[in-house]
Amino acid sequence: MLEGVEWIQAIILGLVQGLTEFLPISSSAHLRIVGQLLPEKADPGAAFTAITQLGTETAVLLYFWRDIVRIISAWFGSLTGRVKRSNPDARMGWLIIIGSIPIGILGLVLEDYIDSTFRSLWIVGTMLIVFAVFLGLADRFGKEQRKIKDLTLGHGLVYGCAQALALIPGVSRSGGTIMAGLFMGYTREAAARYSFLLALPAVFTSGLYKAFKVFTGHEAGGYYGIPSTLLATVIAFGVGYLMIAWFLKYVSSNSYGLFVWYRILLGPGVRGYFLLEFRLSLGAQKYPFAVYRKRVFL
């Protein structure tokens, strides 16, 4: 019976990952939230999240296959002198590498926090609200004059630092990078496209790293076993591929207001749920609100 529940929950989480990965609403936050609301109330964990993201990033790889092959070919060509370093595709290769450095370093340094502290629903709810405000401001005041061809090394590094913020569930990888792009004056579509490409090295490295640790027994896989995690990954791939096309079409003619208001409404609900669960776990009579609220931050 429990195995059946595990498979059903894995299917649901795979759908959630595929639906939310490319939207600026944080897929890792939604996996954490939905996992808590499912019958077993099991946190999928950082490893499950990283591995299922391999499915959605494989969708990116397939969707942008021609662009990626062209970029890789031009980048290698620039190293041997066959292609000028000023070539747009060669420059994009360097921009993706430079933009991936911040999240690579911080991901290793903060691994223990990413696997535990950062997954607190209180933090998740807070980040949903805070970065909804930032995304809304960027969407409202961004000049939207620059295209992808206008990217500079400095802008690539800023994008990379914004992507690194997504190590905290609730920020959103696409939301953070899109926000940075809008603040720097890039169009919504340009910011979204670069966000997809920039995520590839970081997500594949993180996912394969976590998969290696789980498969070799160096890290516990949590409630979800390897077979159910792989099923969720396959589902995330299929749903994610469809979401890429929809999202790029949507942002080409619409603002991010829908996602901003969704985050603002969801954040307080998550924080309220966390406080309710926390109070019930401690005992409402023994620990008044002021006491358990203080303990949240300790």
Image: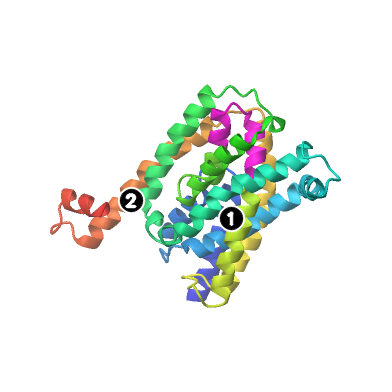
Relative image position of residue 234 (x, y in whole percent)? 66, 62
- Camera-nearest residue between 113 and 79: 79
Q: Relative to residue 185, is residue 242 drawn left or right?
A: right
Magenta residue span: 178-198
- Label total for image: 2
Which secondary structure lies at badge 2?
helix
Crowd around label 1: few <14 · some 14–19 · many ≥20 (10 Å): many
Q: Residue 190 magenta-drawn?
A: yes
Q: Residue 151 magenta-drawn?
A: no
- Amino acid type, label 1: Leu
Name the outermost residue toward the front.
81
Can you identify the residue that label 1 sits on?
15
Rendered residue at 60%/54% (across/down): 202
Which secondary structure lies at badge 1?
helix
Asked whether the viewer can see residue 2, the reply is yes
Relative image position of residue 210 (x, y in whole percent)? 55, 66
Rendered view: 271 above or below 138: below
- Camera-nearest residue between 109 and 124: 109
Asked whether the viewer can see residue 251, the reply is no
- Amino acid type, label 2: Tyr
Relative image position of residue 32 (x, y in whole percent)? 45, 56
Rendered image: mark on residue 129 = none
Tell me the quarter of the picture where residue 7 sits: bottom right
Rendered image: mark on residue 273 = 2
Q: Relative to residue 37, is residue 285 drawn left or right?
A: left
Quadrant, the C terminus = bottom left
